[in-house]
Image: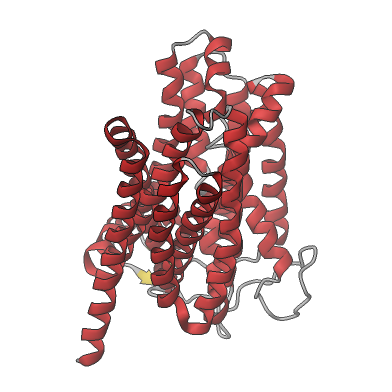
Amino acid sequence: MTETAVPPPSADHPATPAPSAPGAPSAPGTSVPGRGLLLLMAVATGLSCAGNYFAQPLLDLITRDLHISTTLAGLVVTASQTGYALGLLLIVPLGDVLDRRRLAVGLLAATALFLALTAAAPNGPLLLAGTVAVALTAVGAQVVVGYAAALVPDEARGRAVATVMSGILLGGLLARTVSGALAGVGGWRTVYWVSAIPVAVMAVLLHRFLPRVRPTARMSYPALLRSSLSLLREMPLLRLRSTLGALSLASYSVQLTALTFLLARPPYGWSEGGIGLFGLLGAVGVLAMTFAGRLGDRGFVQYVTGLGIVTLGGGWLLLLAGDHSLLWLSVGLVAVNTGQQAVLNSSQTVLYGLRPEARNRLNSVFMTSFFIGGATGSALTAVVWAHSGWSGVCLLGAGLAAGALAMWGLERLGAARHTAH
């Protein structure tokens, strides 16, 4: 079925204005969101994605409570990753052809429902099914990110995307810490029961405050999925940015995995709680993402990408000295997180500007590649750590960052050739 583009909101086709969210400036006659609405969207994305990370520090508790094997419990993490990947491929593109507000609200409501069902799971198989369902619908966060990009003018897109994406970053970072604390009070099920409530509240608030945005294309669902693959085939920039993003997250994931190995052994010998709290240093990346968004809106998006990759790679050189130095370990961790968030924000800013009518499909392709890169980085880390220890994983992380830099170089070379012609 041939795609029929539908104009995005404009002077001729405005979005239906939303009631002013708390803290949002009143702007009669305009659909441009205020900061209050963007912050609401950021909180919604963070709460939506947090459910993907709750189980990671609770696997031992879950194993004992449900009387399941450690192998089956370990599959909970795999189930979450699988569900989210399927959601990116199969659900996120729908944002181009359906009412985005209804889609985003429906996905958050479904996430709340599945969190509650997961909390009530009586055995391992149903826990896995609930985990997949939670992750599948948690891609509502990515629909909200695309929503934010559609609501603002081009010159404000970077900041809007950065604000909403910061919710996803903080949600992932804080979920592990919060889940451990709640589980200590009332067991692992408490985490899922309690989290279902604010997610449901966010669904109600988004329904109340999000403006309506017309679908940007009309096509059947099979044609929609085929068009996502067509975009990847037809757009060299999408291929380059997807590869760049995958390599950058692979580099970042090496740090996430290897840091636990390092801090659990001498000379550190930290507990799981201490390791989790140390990982919160990554929240500095939120500031980097916001700053990167502002620079991108001022026309420096390519510089943000290049500097982000260099910072990511340089962070690994600092981490190399962190084997026996907490100071260098801390500085390196901040550098890796800062560089990664700058690369992510600038890449989304570039891609969202390519085809406004296909933003959700572009994001689907990019984020799927992004998370494949992350999973690959984690898998490589376990192998390299076993053979080469901390120095080996630092070289791995730096090498992946160098690969991302090469992709950016190819992108700039292609742009230069296009300009010359």
Pick whichever, 55 or 231, lies toward us.
Answer: 55
| 230 over 182 or under it: above or below | below
Residue 25 appears left or right of 63: right
- Assign the N terminus to one quadrant of the image: bottom left
Pick whichever, 322 or 400, lies toward us.
Answer: 322
Percent x, y for residue 337? 50, 55
Q: Residue at x 41, y 67 (%)?
A: 347
Residue 227 visible at all: no
Percent x, y for residue 151? 58, 71
Percent x, y for residue 22? 80, 63
| 293 over 279 or under it: above or below | below
Residue 221 appears left or right of 40: left
| 2 over 98 or under it: above or below | below
In the picture, residue 36 is in which quadrant?
bottom right
Residue sitting at the far top: 67
- Assign the C terminus to one quadrant of the image: bottom left
Residue sitting at the far bottom: 420
In the picture, residue 383 is in which quadrant?
top left
Q: Residue at x 46, y 26 (%)?
A: 76
Q: Residue at x 34, y 38 (%)?
A: 381
Percent x, y for residue 275? 57, 35
Residue 116 appears left or right of 412: right
